[in-house]
Image (spheres, rainbow, N blue to C red):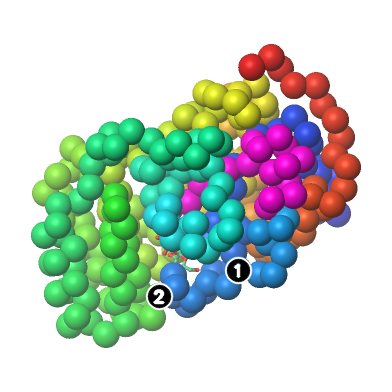
Amino acid sequence: MTSLGVPEIEAGWALFLDLDGTLLDIAPRPDAVVVPAGLTGALAGAAARLGGALAVVSGRARATVDALLAPLTLPGGFGHGAELRDAAGRLGEPGAVPAPPPHWARALEAFAATRPGLLLECKPHGLALHYRAAPDHAAAARAAMAALAAEAARDFELLPAHMAFEIRPRVATKARAVAALMAAPPFRGRRPVFVGDDVTDEDGMAEARRRGGFGLHVGRDFAGDPAEVRAWLARAADARMTEAPLAQS
Ligand SMILES: O=P(O)(O)OC[C@H]1O[C@H](O[C@H]2O[C@H](CO)[C@@H](O)[C@H](O)[C@H]2O)[C@H](O)[C@@H](O)[C@@H]1O
């Protein structure tokens, strides 16, 4: 048990890790995050201890996560679960999740261009309109995003995020990523543990609980500090973990 009362990582777990606000400190802009020295080594070491059952489950696009965590290409769910990659590096079925109509990005580019500080992030399966540098535009940003999402409300939804609004496909959830990965080795048969900080992580935590695991919340369990999560992983990478028998996969 850590000094914060969190169990140390056990060999029989399958670990699902959110990125922003969990592994990485929140930064003023999405492209300003800093990947601390030692993080990729800790992830690789912890993954090895877990027999490869360690995944990143992020709202960011797969390509962005890979660039941030290079040289690692971890299994996971990206774009909130829209893009999947298993432990063998196989990608999810193309076309399984819708992409936003191209005119939405064009409309939001034009909208943001007249409101300094707003930042549009285009992802393969979603859009994020960031207002961290322009909080006065939050209400207008929400209205603009809501109007677009309403054009295809059966397939897309508006998502409030950290100082941003996102449009994401309804099927793209972190629960989808957990369920898909838990269906096959090296995840299958392990106890899923989802670590996150945000409302979108609740889906992943609920799926972990549904499968006999649990969720850890950065705010509640790691004193709100991603450095505590990183230290927890580093200890798992360094230390010999408690060997727990695995269920048959
Ligand atoms: O699921 P996550 O890995 O937590 O990703 C959620 C979103 O994170 C990014 O935006 C957030 O982090 C930025 C960097 O700290 C911050 O500037 C921004 O205000 C936050 O909303 C990312 O840009 C999004 O695509 C992710 O969906």
Q: In which quarter of the image is the N terminus?
A: top right
**Callout 1: 10 Å neighbours few (<14), some, many (20+)?**
few
Residue corresponding to mark 1: 35
Residue corresponding to mark 2: 132
Residue found at the very far top of the displayed protein: 248
Q: Nearer the viewer, residue 240 or 157?
A: 240
What amino acid does circle 2 point to?
Arg
Q: Percent from the top left, x then y, of residue 67?
A: 49, 62
Q: Earlier in the sequence, mark 2 or mark 1?
A: 1
Disc 2 residue lies near ligand 1 with CB under 8 A: yes
Q: What is the tally of numbered marks visible in this picture?
A: 2
Q: Residues in magenta?
A: 43-59
Q: Percent from the top left, x then y, of residue 138?
A: 30, 71
| Residue 195 in view of the camera | yes
Q: Which mark is residue 173?
A: none
Splitting the image into 4 quarters, where does residue 160 fall? bottom left
Q: In this view, does 140 lie to the left or right of 238?
A: left
Task: Name the secondary structure under disc 1.
Answer: loop
Name the residue: 60% across, 26% down: 185
Q: Which of 225 and 24 is in front in this view?
A: 24
Name the residue: 80% across, 21% down: 245
